[in-house]
Image (cartoon, rainbow, N blue to C red):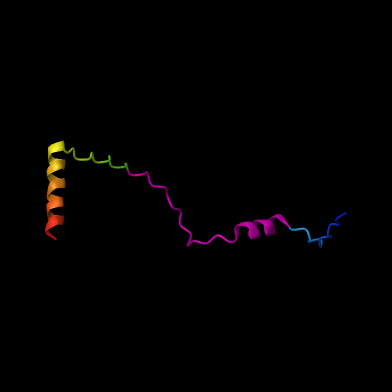
Amino acid sequence: MLRRRSRAQLPPLAEEEVYARSYGERSEEVTNVKRRDPEPEPEPAQPKRITDRALRDAFKSRLEKRDDG
């Protein structure tokens, strides 16, 4: 079986000591920060609609440029 190691007993702490260890000292340098309301998100832009004729013409022009090079 496993044996547990005995821990050294710590001296009892007063409430003031516990508070000081937990929270530290307060200073005047600390400022409170207020939470800002989130900015509204912009609506996504609608993609431009393209006709089949415009798509075909764009494709043809790219093919012609590729043949020239």
Nearer to me, 65 or 43: 65
Give the image quarter of residue 20.
Answer: bottom right
Q: Position of residue 26 (x, y in %)?
A: 55, 60
Q: Quadrant of the N terminus?
A: bottom right
Residue at screen point 58% across, 61% down: 25
Q: Is residue 3 left or right of residue 65?
A: right
The front one of 46 and 26 is 46
The residue at 47%/62% (across/down) is 29
Whole-percent x, y for residue 51 in the image? 15, 36
Q: For this rendering, which residue is in front, 28 or 53? A: 53
Q: Nearer the viewer, residue 23 or 36?
A: 36
**Rendering quarter of residue 8:** bottom right
Q: Is residue 45 left or right of residue 32?
A: left
Left or right relative to 24: residue 56: left
> Is 32 one of the magenta-colored residues?
yes
Q: Position of residue 10 (x, y in %)?
A: 78, 61
Residue 41 appearing in the image: yes
Q: Main secondary structure of the magenta part?
A: loop
Could you tell me if residue 51 is visible in this image?
no
Measured from the top left, where is residue 34 in percent x and y? 42, 49
Identify the residue at image location x=36%, y=44%.
Answer: 38
Classify residue 18 by image quadrant.
bottom right
Query: Residue sitting at 14 percent across and 61 percent down?
Result: 69
Above or below, 56 against 14 in this view is above
Range shown magenta: 14-39
Confirm whether the magenta stretch covers residue 60: no
Q: Is residue 65 above or below residue 59?
A: below
Name the residue at the front extreme: 67
